[in-house]
């Protein structure tokens, strides 16, 4: 597909593929035939109503057994090139249910598979077979995920997950039209292994990767989550990160069915910056600002209805206001959705005492006063308002931070976790987290001693209130990318694969985290992109973490 490059924008890249499929199939009624993974990839970049406007009236899964034959429909198939999908397509083409088939694979398909499809197509219903490399979930324009959990067994790759990760990462490179130089984290065997596998694909499929050379070659940097196990364990205070941490985002969908008194139409909501202006403008703002912005939005609406002036003081007032205005709901489903989401976040923050919990998490992640930290953790472990998950999270952070401290209070803290009467699972997780991301494993200095000036600067960087104490922490990735952009990232820790090295500072950077990225890191990348004109960074991970994952 030789269209214009998607400018380091993952959402746009996949959207362009979907648009092209629909265009290529011409006018007339169509069915979109997908598998579980491509359904996810399409759903995050296109809404159902947008696709309906393009004469796609039916969405089906290739593996659903009881599909009706509909000879008046054209079929657009968008599928991963797996053995199962090829077999299902062979059966489909032997007894076609639709008039004509446009087949698009989300990754490289072997010649033998294409031959098998051609042999099955006795009725000559296949109009074309192409490769469109949308083999990943485009979470934000600069963030992608492969939705894979548990990619490694101990310190080495699960072979099936390594294959899938290689495919996802090479598809991203092809869709953004990048043939990169590769650097990887030396302390991580999985990072080296993935770097080699990606390089093999680039070498084997050299014709596909033959893009117009840029002055400064793009760079792929492969890192390992175990170098920073702290970031995924912290409570978050910016909108997108907070929603994922407390409610969970799954392919842009949020399950609100457990929210007390939720109305039927809000049991599941979609948060997508592509078609929700409020979310696009607020996803990286902190919680205090979002509350203010929702209030402003609603007051703006009220100003248009001067008869019914009413004060909006609290989240409860806002909810009552929304419920009393059916026409308001119609005009502004967006607002009722965000009031509900923010209302639920507020409820959870209060119920789980998260402001206090988060303050101690930040102290553990950013300060180095052992006795004060230990006291703070013990105080919260004794509070009945602190949930089992949050108690365990504090002990995990303490264990990572003060793993080798002479007077470690870890045994006592584990005992207190047990005394809370929770399950054994969380206590076992504490040692598992240290084994995964402890000092023995880390290649970098996660807790570099910060001098007083740096600490003061961090404290003053905030806007007000919630910004400073609760968001002191900077993910390790921020520092790594900062060094990379300045041309100071050490080759001895992050070597190049192969003999060539980059002479200039990199401009187009794809950074991939084995073991998953976080929305806190997505925010860091967003800010780096904004503050470094000429540098464009895309962040990917095997998954997008929250503490429960």
Image (cartoon, helix red, strand yellow):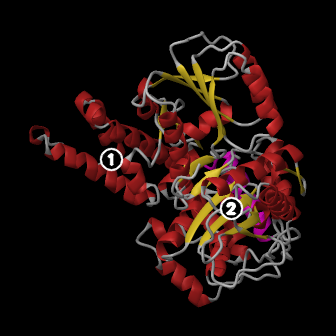
Q: Quadrant of residue 224?
A: bottom right
**For this rendering, which residue is in front, 216 or 265?**
216
The stretch drawn in magenta includes residue 355: no
Give the number of the disc on residue 250. Answer: none
Please give the name of the residue rendered at 42% of the width and 26% of the height, measured from the top-left corner. Answer: 265
Please give the name of the residue rendered at 57% of the width and 90% of the height, measured from the top-left corner. Answer: 453
On the image, the x and y values in percent for residue 236 come to 56, 58
Q: What stretch is highlighted in magenta?
A: 379-402
Secondary structure mainly formed by the magenta segment: helix
Q: Are marks 2 and 1 in contact (CB under 8 Å)?
A: no
> In this figure, which residue is indicated by the disc labeled 1?
314
Please give the name of the residue rendered at 80% of the width and 75% of the height, measured from the top-left corner. Answer: 496
**Residue located farthest toward the left when viewing the structure as drawn:** 307
The stretch drawn in magenta includes residue 396: yes
Q: In this view, does 361 lie above or below 132?
A: below
**For this rendering, which residue is in front, 282 or 235?**
282
Q: SS class of the residue under badge 2?
A: loop
Mark 2 or 1: the one toward you = 2
- Does 250 sit left or right of 491 as displayed? left
Give the number of the disc on residue 210. Answer: 2
Q: SS class of the residue under badge 1?
A: loop
- Does 309 sit left or right of 139 as displayed? left
Q: Is residue 388 above or below residue 173?
A: above
């Amino acid at each position: 597909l030789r269209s214009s490059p998607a400018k380091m924008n993952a959402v746009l890249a996949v959207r362009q593929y979907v648009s092209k499929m629909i265009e290529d199939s011409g006018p007339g009624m169509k069915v979109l035939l997908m598998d579980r993974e491509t359904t996810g990839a399409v759903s995050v970049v296109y809404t159902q109503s947008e696709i309906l406007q393009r004469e796609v009236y039916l969405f089906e899964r290739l593996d659903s057994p009881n599909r009706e034959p509909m000879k008046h429909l054209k079929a657009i198939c968008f599928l991963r090139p797996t053995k199962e999908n090829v077999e299902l397509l062979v059966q489909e083409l032997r007894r076609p249910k639709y008039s004509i088939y446009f087949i698009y694979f989300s990754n490289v398909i072997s010649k033998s598979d294409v031959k098998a499809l051609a042999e099955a197509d006795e009725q000559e219903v296949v109009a074309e077979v192409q490769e469109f490399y949308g083999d990943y979930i485009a979470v934000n324009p600069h963030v992608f995920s492969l939705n894979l959990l548990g990619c490694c067994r101990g310190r080495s790759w699960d072979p099936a997950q390594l294959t899938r990760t290689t495919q996802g990462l090479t598809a991203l490179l092809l869709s953004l039209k990048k043939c990169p130089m590769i650097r990887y984290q030396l302390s991580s065997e999985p990072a080296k292994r993935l770097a080699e596998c990606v390089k093999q694909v680039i070498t084997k499929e050299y014709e596909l990767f033959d893009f117009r050379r840029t002055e400064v070659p793009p760079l792929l940097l492969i890192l390992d989550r175990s170098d920073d196990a702290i970031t995924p364990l912290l409570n978050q205070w910016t909108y997108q990160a907070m929603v994922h941490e407390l409610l969970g985002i799954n392919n842009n969908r949020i399950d609100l069915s457990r929210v007390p008194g939720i109305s039927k139409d809000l049991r599941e909501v979609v948060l997508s910056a592509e078609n929700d202006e409020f979310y696009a403008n607020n996803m990286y703002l902190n919680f205090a600002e979002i509350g203010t912005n929702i209030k402003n939005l609603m007051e703006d609406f009220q100003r248009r209805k001067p008869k019914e002036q009413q004060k909006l003081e609290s989240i409860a007032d806002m909810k009552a206001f929304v419920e009393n205005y059916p026409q308001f709901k119609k005009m502004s489903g967006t607002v009722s959705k965000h009031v509900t989401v923010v209302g639920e976040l507020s409820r959870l923050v209060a119920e789980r005492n998260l402001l206090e919990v988060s303050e101690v998490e930040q102290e553990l992640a950013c300060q180095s006063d052992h006795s004060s930290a230990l006291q703070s953790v013990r105080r919260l472990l004794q509070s009945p308002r602190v949930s089992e998950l949050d108690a365990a999270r504090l002990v995990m952070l303490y264990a990572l931070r003060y793993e080798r401290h002479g007077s470690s209070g870890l045994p006592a803290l584990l005992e207190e976790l047990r005394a809370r009467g929770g399950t054994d699972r969380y206590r076992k997780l504490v040692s598992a987290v240290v084994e995964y991301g402890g000092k023995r494993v880390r290649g970098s200095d996660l807790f570099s001693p910060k001098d007083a000036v740096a600490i003061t600067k961090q404290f003053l960087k905030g806007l007000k209130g919630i910004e400073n104490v609760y968001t002191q922490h900077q993910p390790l990735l921020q520092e790594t990318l900062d060094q990379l952009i300045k041309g100071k990232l050490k080759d001895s820790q992050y070597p190049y694969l192969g003999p060539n090295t980059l002479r200039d500072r990199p401009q187009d950077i794809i950074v991939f985290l084995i073991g998953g990225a976080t929305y806190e890191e997505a925010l860091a990348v967003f800010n780096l992109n904004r503050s470094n004109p000429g540098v464009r960074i895309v962040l990917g991970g095997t998954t997008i973490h929250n503490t429960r994952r």
